[in-house]
């Protein structure tokens, strides 16, 4: 059996079809926890791609080795491990140069891919819509482009040779035999195709805006529970999965927050060091976030380091031009948060809303906050407007949110959220909370 097995690159001689992966990281800066967290995330990405992690190696260095990523001595040590553990693929925790990938693959005698190729592979597996597939194809082609030059024989190893396996699901014709010219032509045609789909999306968004319905976008780290929250808030049935990047395509649903109807959009999750080709290719999807009236930034409060995830998400939103969009931070999975975690999170982010999409805890309060933010105020007022104040009534309707309205003998009785600039004017018509005979 052992002599029959040519690791990874020969098909049909393995009992289990699951690809066996060794993680290799270089720890250059940050704390030991950060380094461990990075590798744990890489392991989760490998699992999301459907492969199995059989070993992890981290090397402490000032910077990655320019030639081989990890030092060549360390790489030589790995060769024995690769054989003993029947490792098919080594996944490096960074973006490697084409030359680094080839040299390391030669040293360790296994397929070597980097974090970027791994994430692209997951997206390629997940993409189902025409737009999603085109976006991923474009990102993959951009990634392949600089890796086509002058690699000769070694590229077939990089791109995996004969079908199957991590990061080998290319956008069709991007294997070694495809020259740069054809790749460039393909990219051009996918770009055009995407542009047309983007126009359609922009039109739909414009229509939504034209109807004056505010748009709220769910954004956040992958696996934070965005889709679960959409389902909880709208009764939608979007796929929820304990896996990274379960959602690629945005889903839009209507939801009633307070007295106000708005749209709620589920979007693709973020991850630290998100490959920039993906951000570029998914730009139109990400516009659901940058053009929203309000972002619900969902964070997994049961994760070991939610603050780092929050930072990553805000950085990505800033990069795509969404820094100015108002945000409500939503600390999700409160039911699963370890002892003290919510307190620490709230100490750093006092405005966060604590919820559980699973149990529904905190969700009503969150909807109130959404309504409040959308109407640009925290002032909920009980009013009795005489019928002579028709103008004021109209302005409250236009600029605020009317929660309840009742016509009485003496005027219109209202419960409304009123923007601050109107509050002074309506103040004289305020109904006393502790009316006569009250406590
Ligand atoms: N315990 C607990 N688990 C939750 C909660 N919300 C979501 N989950 C779980 O977290 C996992 C991810 O949930 P999703 O809703 O798919 O997360 P997402 O943010 O949409 O993830 P991506 O689309 O992959 O970026 C699933 O296993 C959910 O069941 C919660 O409030 N409590
Ligand atoms: Mg999702």
Image (cartoon, helix red, strand yellow):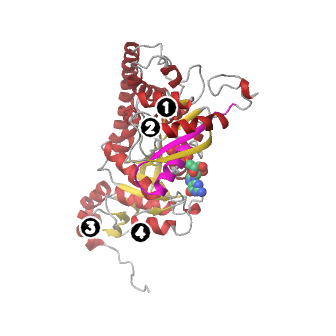
Q: Position of residue 108 (x, y in %)?
A: 55, 32
Magenta residues, start to end: 17-44
Between disc 4 and disc 3, whose residue precedes?
A: 4
Q: Mark 4 — residue? A: 347
Instruction: Where is residue 142? Give x, y as percent.
Output: 39, 26
- Asked if ligand 1 lies within 8 A of label 3, the reply is no
Report the residue marked by disc 2.
69
Viewer can see residue 267? yes
In depth, the one of 406 and 119 nearer the eye is 119
The residue depicted at 44 percent of the width and 40 percent of the height is: 94
Tell me where residue 287 appears, x and y as whole percent: 36, 39
User: In whole angstroms, how far apart are the C-alphas of marks 2 and 4?
Assistant: 39 Å
Q: Report how far apart the C-alphas of labels 4 and 1 lie in the structure.
A: 45 Å
Distance between the alpha carbons at the discs numbered 3 and 2: 62 Å
**Secondary structure state at the residue bearing disc 2:** loop
Q: Quadrant of residue 168?
A: top right
Q: From this view, report whether residue 164 is shown above or below residue 248.
A: above
- Tag 1 and tag 2, C-beta contact below 8 Å: yes
Can you see residue 51? Answer: no
How many numbered marks does the figure carry?
4
Question: Circle 1 is placed at which residue position?
Answer: 104
From the viewer's perspective, tell me whether residue 157 is left or right of residue 3. left
């Amino acid at each position: 059996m052992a002599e029959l097995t040519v690791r990874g690159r020969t098909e049909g001689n393995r009992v289990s079809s699951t690809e066996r992966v060794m993680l290799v990281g270089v720890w250059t800066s940050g704390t030991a926890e950060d380094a461990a967290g990075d590798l744990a995330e890489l392991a989760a990405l490998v699992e999301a791609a459907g492969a199995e992690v059989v070993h992890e190696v981290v090397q402490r260095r000032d910077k990655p080795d320019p030639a081989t990523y990890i030092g060549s001595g360390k790489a030589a040590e790995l060769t024995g491990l690769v054989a003993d553990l029947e490792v098919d693929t080594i996944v490096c925790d960074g973006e490697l140069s084409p030359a680094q990938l080839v040299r390391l693959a030669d040293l360790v005698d296994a397929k070597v891919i980097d974090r970027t190729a791994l994430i692209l592979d997951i997206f390629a597996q997940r993409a189902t819509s025409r737009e999603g597939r085109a976006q991923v194809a474009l990102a993959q082609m951009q990634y392949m482009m600089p890796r086509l030059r002058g690699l000769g024989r070694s590229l077939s190893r990089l791109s995996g040779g004969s079908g199957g396996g991590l990061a080998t699901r290319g956008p069709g014709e991007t294997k070694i035999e495809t020259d740069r010219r054809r790749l460039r032509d393909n990219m051009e045609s996918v770009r055009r195709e995407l542009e047309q789909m983007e126009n359609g999306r922009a039109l739909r968004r414009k229509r939504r805006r034209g109807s004056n319905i505010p748009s709220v976008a769910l954004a956040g780290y992958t696996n934070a529970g965005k889709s679960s929250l959409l389902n909880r808030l709208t009764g939608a049935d979007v796929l929820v999965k304990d896996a990274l990047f379960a959602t690629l395509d945005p889903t839009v649903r209507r939801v009633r927050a307070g007295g106000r109807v708005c749209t709620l959009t589920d979007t693709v999750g973020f991850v630290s060091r998100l490959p920039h080709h993906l951000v570029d290719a998914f730009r139109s999807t990400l516009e659901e976030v940058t053009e929203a009236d309000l972002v619900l930034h969902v964070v997994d409060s049961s994760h070991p380091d939610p603050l780092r995830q929050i930072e990553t998400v805000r950085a990505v939103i800033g990069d795509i031009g969404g820094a100015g969009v108002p945000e409500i931070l939503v600390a999700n999975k409160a039911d699963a948060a370890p002892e003290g975690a919510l307190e620490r999170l709230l100490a750093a982010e006092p405005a966060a809303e604590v919820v559980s999409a699973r149990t529904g805890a905190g969700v009503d309060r969150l909807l109130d906050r959404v309504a409040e933010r959308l109407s640009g105020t925290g002032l909920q007022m009980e009013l009795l407007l005489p019928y002579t104040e028709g103008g004021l009534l109209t302005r409250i309707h236009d600029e605020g949110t009317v929660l309840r309205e009742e016509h009485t003998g003496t005027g219109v009785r209202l419960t409304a959220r009123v923007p601050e600039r109107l509050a002074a004017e309506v103040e004289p018509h305020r109904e006393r909370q502790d009316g006569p005979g009250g406590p």
